[in-house]
Image (spheres, rainbow, N blue to C red):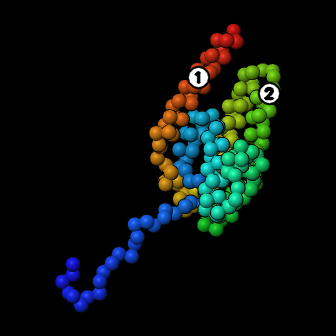
Amino acid sequence: MQDNIYAVPESSLHTESEAPVVQEFYVVSKLKFFLLFFCTMGLYGFYWNYRSWKQYKIANNEDMWPVARAIFSIFFTHSLYGIIDMRAVEKDSSYKWSPNLWATLVVVSIIADNISGRVGGNETLVNSFIFFNLIARGLFMFQAQKAANIACGDPEGISNSHFSPLNFLWIFMFPIIFVVAVIAAILFAG
């Protein structure tokens, strides 16, 4: 209650129900991106594509299926990277990257990975190629993540740098499952 009865009443202009700002793209920190990508042996790439398209759909009220765009990412990678590039340049005109080059490298990496899994011959050579291809694809995809972070005004991905319990589950359980599968394959092959 105010002491001056003639004073204009004071009120807060902020409402409690202000909607949170929806980022146009999926923002994630460098450490979180690489840990989740490599600990899931690249499966995080599908989730990353899904979340990127889902964020874009929500922010722009687009009529699309993010799940389909993630599953068939080789057909949609160039368009996603192009959209991210437009928004990143709008936010920071000094930021330069080559979205077509990085998108092409990601698509070629995915296709090469699928082909190499079907090629017979020297298993050590094939497995080495798959391993190095995974590292390369993670590096290629992170170029788009950097641009998406810039486009959303969070270049370091601070808003999504903390690890959730589900993140930790993927980080620790997926490698254990992978090792058990490799041991089982070795035991049953011999």
Q: Quadrant of the N terminus?
A: bottom left
Please identify the quarter of the rendering in which residue 36 is found. Answer: top right
Q: Nearer the viewer, residue 10 or 142?
A: 10
Q: Quadrant of the C terminus?
A: top right
Task: Determine the residue positioned at 50% across, 39% down.
Answer: 166
Task: Determine the residue positioned at 46% across, 47% down.
Answer: 162
**Tag 1, which secondary structure?**
helix
Three-letter residue code for mark 2: Arg
Q: Is residue 178 visible?
A: yes
Q: Which residue is denoted by mark 1 in the rendering?
A: 179
Give the crowd class for mark 1: few <14, some 14-19, many >=20 residues within 10 Å: few
* Residue 144, horizontal then vertical, whole percent: 65, 52
* Residue 2, horizontal then vertical, whole percent: 21, 81
Task: Determine the residue positioned at 64% across, 63% down.
Answer: 61
Q: Is residue 143 visible?
A: no
Three-letter residue code for mark 1: Val
Residue sticking out furthest to the bottom: 6
* Residue 134, horizontal then vertical, whole percent: 67, 36
Answer left or right for 9 relative to 140: left
Q: Which residue is denoted by mark 2 in the rendering?
A: 118
Task: Determine the residue positioned at 57% across, 25% down.
Answer: 177
- State how far apart marks 1 and 2 are (Cα): 21 Å
What is the tally of numbered marks visible in this picture?
Answer: 2
